[in-house]
Amino acid sequence: MNSSHQVSISSLSGAPPETAAIRFMALLPAGWHAEIGELGENLARLLIAAPPGTTASQTTEIAADILSRPGLQDWQLADR
């Protein structure tokens, strides 16, 4: 069974969260999947399904790496 983790990303740039969520999901490693849990103004909350045994900190590492890539650089991990 996969490990599930919630990740929230936010931006103050005014970029559409729908676009950021799709870009984020497209950059997940092989074997990882995500679905959109919630979209709000400048916020996207995603439910990540990672390979079994993946920890929350590993998920955060992967998310931070994804957010450093072109097209998502204005986005950051959110505490909400």
Image (cartoon, helix red, strand yellow):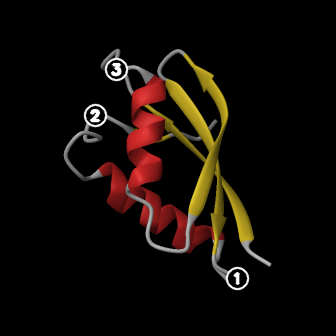
Mark earlier in primary sequence (3, 2): 3
Amino acid bearing label 1: Pro
Mark earlier in primary sequence (1, 3): 3
Q: Give how far apart the Cα atoms at labels 2 and 1 are.
A: 30 Å
Amino acid bearing label 2: Asp
Place residue 73 in its image quadrant: top left
Amino acid bearing label 3: Ala
Q: Position of residue 64 (x, y in %)?
A: 39, 57
Mark earlier in primary sequence (2, 1): 1
| Left or right: residue 53 compared with residue 30 | right
Asked whether 17 or 55 is in front, the reply is 17
The single residue placed furthest to the left in the displayed view is 70
- Identity of the residue drawn at 59% across and 41% down: 79
Q: Is residue 61 above or below residue 12?
A: below
Question: Mark 1 falls on what kind of element?
Answer: loop
Residue at mark 2: 74
Residue at mark 3: 15
| Left or right: residue 72 compared with residue 24 | left
Question: Mark 2 falls on what kind of element?
Answer: loop
User: From the viewer's perspective, is the residue at label 3 or at label 2 nearer?
Assistant: 3
Question: Mark 3 falls on what kind of element?
Answer: loop
Residue at mark 1: 52
Q: Quadrant of the C terminus?
A: top right
Q: Position of residue 57 (x, y in %)?
A: 57, 70
**Contact? badges 3 and 2 (CB < 8 Å):** yes
